[in-house]
Image (spheres, rainbow, N blue to C red):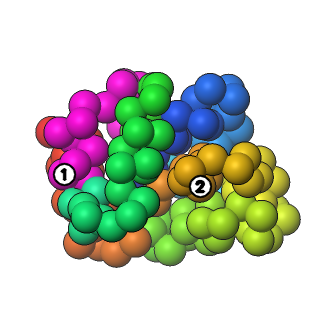
Amino acid sequence: MQTLVLCKPDAVRRNLIGEIIRRCEQKGYVVAKLAKLVPSRQLLAQHYLEHEGKPFYEPLMEFMLSGEVVAIALEGERVIEGFRALAGSTEPTLAAPGTIRGDLGRDWGTKVVQNLVHGSDSDESAARELALWFS
């Protein structure tokens, strides 16, 4: 089983890619594919399709277009739920210690929460997102 993990622009800017991958590998997951890129607006529009029209959509797009992203196809048994537990709450201030967001993230007072990582939330979204980022 695979999931998409994105190290968002804030993680890349803060040089946290290695630490994020280390935590995934330490958990026993395998990096099957990895790409570092500046995503296009078209790719992000497809990725965040379900959020189009919501108040946070444009600030989210602006943030995700602000720099490089590392896309990872992460592999392992129950990797989708496992990575989401490893990532922690999407709100870094409330994320539990020991999680990626709890240990490394914080609220920077920006228009949209910069929370370091994205992880697919289901088998269906993982398949769709992996196809988008690794076509």
Q: Residue at x 56, y 51 (%)?
A: 111
Q: Earlier in the sequence, mark 1 or mark 2?
A: 1
Q: Magenta span covers which residues? A: 33-47
Residue at the (60%, 36%) spot, across then down: 10
Q: How many marks?
A: 2
Q: CA distance from mark 1 to mark 2?
A: 20 Å
Residues at circles 1 and 2 in contact by the CB criterion of under 8 Å = no
Tell me the kind of residue under disc 1. Gln
The answer to which image quadrant residue 3 occupies is bottom left
* Residue assigned mark 1: 46
Q: Residue at x 84, y 65 (%)?
A: 97
Where is residue 46? Give x, y as percent: 19, 51
What secondary structure is found at the residue carrying circle 2? loop
For image coordinates 81% across by 54% down, the residue present is: 103
**Secondary structure under the numbered disc 1 in the rendered image:** helix
Residue 101 in percent (x, y) is at: 70, 57
Judged left or right of residue 83, residue 35 is left
Crowding at dot 2, Cα within 10 Å, few <14 / some 14-19 / many 20+, comes out as some
Q: Quadrant of the N terminus?
A: bottom left
Asked if residue 62 is among those painted magenta in the image, a careful observer would answer no
Q: Nearer the viewer, residue 75 or 100?
A: 100
Q: Quadrant of the C terminus?
A: top left
Left or right, 9 with respect to 58, comes to right
Q: Is residue 84 above or below residue 26?
A: below
Q: Position of residue 35 (x, y in %)?
A: 37, 29
Kind of residue sitting beneath label 2? Val
Can the viewer see residue 70 in this picture?
no
According to the image, label 2 marks what residue?
Answer: 113
Q: Position of residue 93 (x, y in %)?
A: 77, 64
